[in-house]
Image (cartoon, helix red, strand yellow):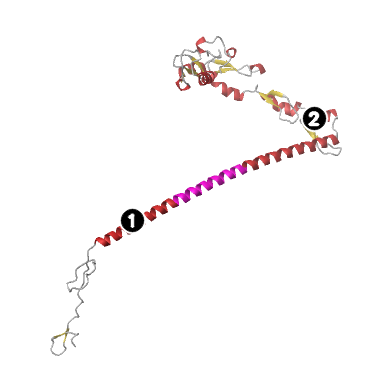
Amino acid sequence: MGFELDRFSGEVDPDLKCNLCNKVLEDPLTTPCGHVFCAGCVLPWVVQQGSCPVKCRRMSAKELNHVLPLKSLILKLDIKCANRARGCGAVVKLQHLAEHAEACGYSAARCRHRGCAEVLNARDVEAHMREACAARPAGSCERGCGLALTHGERQAGSHCCLQALKAHGAALQAQLAGLEKELKKEALRAGKREKALLAQLSAAQLELQVTALRYQKKFTEYSARLDSLSRSLAASTPNKVNPHGGPPWPQHRPSCLLPAPRQPLALHPLSGAAKNPAAS
């Protein structure tokens, strides 16, 4: 969008101007053909027209490139504060303009008292609200209604309790209506969020059921396969031939039989000969 030429101190080099807005370049971008424009000027043009603004060639927005050296040069220019018409005479480097504008005491600001439409310099607002604003508080009505009075009402003696109470009641009703409207909007938003959450929960449950069925099917297939393999293995294992002519013996795994332990020998008390306890 560019910066106004009259905000800069002295003459501005023509090479620092945008060919679209004719202002000092703001965030300059260059085309493949070498033309330079403000980012805020050239991007919408290229998106809509699909060509360089000079109409020298077709191009897309992704072909635009930042010109960092040129941007650095522009940021070092001296520029006047945007609030110069309100009384600010500050001249700062363009790179510090945003910082100055945030703290500038000449920025436009409204009085915060209800009923006051004054727009002042930011540095003058507090003094105006404290000393000069006709809408500043001036105590309460002592004639029966007890409502707050403004400085202007007290000075003019224009306060009417009946009218003030009616106005106060109307303001409260308007405030209540606004709150009810906001409550309905919030309830509607909450209902939409609840429906969305229920839909997400239903989708998650359905996905979980589908996953469970898929795993159950796989488990059934694996169980059937294991049973089939077990039957095939049993059918392929031969039985032993009974040497006594009887039915064949089933194939068993070999086992190892250990002999029974022998009883210890005992000596006869008279002869001293060894005696087997089992024989006695």
Q: Which residues are magenta?
A: 190-212
Q: Looking at this view, is 28 or 152 the one in front? A: 28
Say whether disc 1 or disc 2 marks the residue closer to the N-terminus: 2
Residue at 41% from the left image edge and 53% from the top image edge = 217
Circle 1 or circle 2, nearest the eye:
1
User: Which numbered circle lies on residue 151?
Assistant: 2
Quadrant for the N terminus in the image: top right
User: How busy is the neighbourhood of tag 1: few (under 14 within 10 Å), some, or many (20 plus)?
Assistant: few
Expressed as whole percent of the image width and height from the top left, the position of residue 242 reads 19, 71
Q: Which mark is residue 225?
A: 1
Instruction: Answer with the quarter of the image where residue 150 lies.
Output: top right
Horizontally, is 78 left or right of 269 in the view?
right
- 127 relative position to 145: left or right: left
Which residue sits at x=45%, y=20%?
63
Circle 2: residue type: His
- Mark on residue 249? none
